[in-house]
């Protein structure tokens, strides 16, 4: 399999997701190692969207522990209910935060981060981690991101 992605920056956001998703599917098809697949998903999203930070935290006991990511170094452990990631885990909900300074308890791993989207990752009914995307721009994420990022993480929720 060719590992080069076809990156389409001249399209609108929705079309960029539509072009990327089959490529992500192809990348992870036939590979059952979740960490390898999460690593390639983070890399593919970073390559397509050039977000400030994109990556996964995985549930270990009562904490989220940093998993595969792309971007600057980040906080290693987040308690359940803490920050946007811990809240998305606890509430089992996608959280879109247009201005992280307005989110009570936001964990600032990097001061450059201004807005964020976090989606829970499931195995069956259980939350096994979160996908976290951070932007240096305010109000960078919306329902389009929520819809397509959910499709992407559903690709790996079978593990
Ligand atoms: N801001 C997140 C923490 C993770 S980092 O930004 C990579 C939060 O509040 O959960």
Image (cartoon, helix red, strand yellow):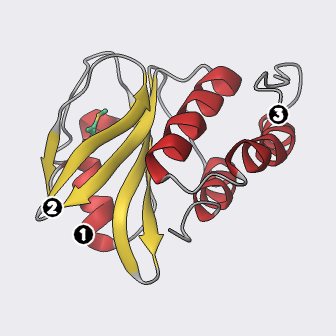
When asked about the image quadrant of residue 136, the answer is top left
**Which of the two labelled residues, at mark 2 and mark 3, occupies the earlier sequence position?**
3
What residue is pinned by disc 1? 90
Q: Is residue 134 visible?
A: no
Residue 12 vertical position relative to residue 137 in the rendered view, above or below: below
Residue extending furthest bottom? 125
Say which of marks 3 and 1 sits in front: 3
Q: How many angstroms separate mark 2 from mark 3 (CA)?
A: 39 Å
Q: Secondary structure at mark 3?
A: loop
Q: Is mark 3 within 8 Å of ligand 1?
A: no
> Which residue is labeled 3 in the image?
1
Q: How far across and down, in percent of the image, does residue 49 sit?
A: 66, 25
Q: Name the residue nearer the viewer: 49 or 25.
A: 25
Callout in the foreground (2, 3):
3
**Residue 113's quadrant in the figure?**
top left
| Residue located 57% across and 28% down the image | 43
Of helix, strand and loop, which one carries label 1?
A: helix
Mark 2 or 1 closer to N-term?
A: 2
**How far across and down, in percent of the image, does residue 14 sit?**
81, 43
Q: Are marks 3 and 1 in contact (CB under 8 Å)?
A: no
| Label 3 CA crowd tier, 10 Å (few <14, some 14–19, many 20+) | few
| Residue 60 in view (yes/no) | yes
Q: Where is 102 relative to 146, above or below?
A: above
Rendered residue at 31%/36% (across/down) = 100
Dot 2 beta carbon under 8 Å from ligand 1: no
| 28 with respect to 32 (left or right) | right
- Label 2 to label 1: alpha-carbon separation: 6 Å
Residue at mark 2: 80
State yes or no: discs 2 and 1 in contact (Cβ < 8 Å).
yes
């Amino acid at each position: 399999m060719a590992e080069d992605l076809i990156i389409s920056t001249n399209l609108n956001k929705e079309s960029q997701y539509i072009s990327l998703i089959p490529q992500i599917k192809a990348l992870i098809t036939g590979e059952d190692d979740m960490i390898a697949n999460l690593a390639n998903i983070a890399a593919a999203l970073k390559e397509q969207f050039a977000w400030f930070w994109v990556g996964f935290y995985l549930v270990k006991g009562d904490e989220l522990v940093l998993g595969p990511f792309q971007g600057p170094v980040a906080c290693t452990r987040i308690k359940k209910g803490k920050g946007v990631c811990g809240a998305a885990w606890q509430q089992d909900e996608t959280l879109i935060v247009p201005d992280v300074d307005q989110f009570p308890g936001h964990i600032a791993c990097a001061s450059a981060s201004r807005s964020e989207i976090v989606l829970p990752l499931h195995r069956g009914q259980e939350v096994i981690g979160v996908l976290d995307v951070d932007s240096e721009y305010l109000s960078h994420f919306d329902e389009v991101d929520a819809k397509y990022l959910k499709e992407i993480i559903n690709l790996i929720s079978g593990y």
